[in-house]
C-alpha cells in the first residue's frame, strides 16, 4: 500500500507543479514556449520516478486542469498538442536500439504535431503569401529547433536523474 500512496502523492505533486508552471506561462506571454517546455519536465520526472503510466496520468490531469483554470489557454494548448506528451513519447522512442531510427521517429512525431498545430492555428502562425515554400521553411526551421530542443531536454533529464532522482547511483 505504501508504494501506491507514494505514486499517487508524487503524481499529484508533479501535476500541481506542472499546472503552476503553465499558469505562469499563461500570464507571462513572453516566456510561453520556455515555461511550457519547463512544465513538461515534471512529466519527464514522473516517467523517471514511476514509469510511463504515471507520466500519462500526470499529463492527463495537468492538461485537464490547465484547460479548465488557466486565464489564457494558449499555453495549455501548446502543452496538450506537443510539450505535454513528448516526454512520454521520448521515453518510449529511446528504447529503440538505433540512434538514427530514434531521430527519424522523433522528427516524425514533431512534424505530425506541427501539422496539427499548423492546420488548427494557421491564422496565428506566420502568414506566408508564397504558400508551399513558406510551409517548407516552417517545417525545416521547426525541425532544426526541435533537434536543439531535444538535445537540451535530454541533458536536463539526465541532470534530474543524476542530481535529484531516487535512482541516483
Image (cartoon, rainbow, N blue to C red):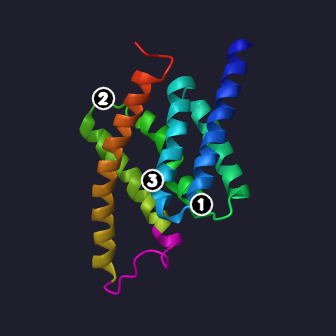
Identify which residue is drawn at 66% across, 33% down.
Answer: 13
Mark yes or no: residue 85 visible.
Answer: no
Q: Calculate the distance from the C-alpha at mark 3 to the C-alpha at mark 2.
A: 30 Å
Identify which residue is drawn at 68% across, 57% down.
Answer: 67
Residue matched to label 1? 26
Tell me: 3 left or right of 75. Answer: right
CB contact under 8 Å: marks 1 and 3: no
Q: Calculate the distance from the C-alpha at mark 2 to the C-alpha at mark 1.
A: 38 Å
Q: Decide: few, some or many residues near mark 2? Use Cα within 10 Å; few <14, some 14-19, many ≥20.
A: few
Identify which residue is drawn at 27% across, 56% down.
Answer: 144
Give coordinates of residue 96: x percent, y percent. Answer: 35, 32
Identify which residue is drawn at 55% across, 26% down.
Answer: 51
From what the image shows, is residue 100 above or below residue 27? above
SS type, badge 2: loop
Residue matched to label 2? 97
Q: Nearer the viewer, mark 3 or mark 2?
A: 3
Residue matched to label 3? 34
Residue 119 is covered by the magenta coloring: yes
**Which stretch appears magenta?**
118-130
Image quadrant assignment for residue 53:
top right
Q: Does label 2 or label 1 sit earlier along the sequence?
A: 1
Amino acid at each position: 500500500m505504501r508504494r501506491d500512496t507514494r505514486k499517487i502523492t508524487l503524481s499529484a505533486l508533479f501535476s500541481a507543479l506542472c499546472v503552476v508552471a503553465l499558469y505562469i506561462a499563461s500570464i507571462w506571454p513572453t516566456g510561453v514556449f520556455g515555461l511550457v517546455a519547463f512544465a513538461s519536465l515534471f512529466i519527464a520526472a514522473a516517467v523517471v520516478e514511476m514509469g510511463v503510466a504515471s507520466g500519462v496520468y500526470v499529463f492527463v490531469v495537468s492538461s485537464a486542469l490547465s484547460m479548465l483554470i488557466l486565464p489564457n489557454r494558449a499555453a495549455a494548448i501548446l502543452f496538450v498538442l506537443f510539450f505535454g506528451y513528448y516526454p512520454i513519447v521520448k521515453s518510449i522512442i529511446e528504447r529503440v536500439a538505433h540512434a538514427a531510427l530514434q531521430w527519424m521517429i522523433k522528427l516524425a512525431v514533431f512534424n505530425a504535431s506541427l501539422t496539427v498545430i499548423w492546420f488548427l492555428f494557421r491564422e496565428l502562425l506566420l502568414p506566408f503569401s508564397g504558400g508551399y515554400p513558406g510551409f517548407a521553411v516552417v517545417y525545416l526551421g521547426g525541425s532544426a529547433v526541435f533537434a536543439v530542443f531535444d538535445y537540451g531536454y535530454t541533458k536536463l533529464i539526465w541532470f534530474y536523474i543524476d542530481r535529484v532522482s531516487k535512482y541516483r547511483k
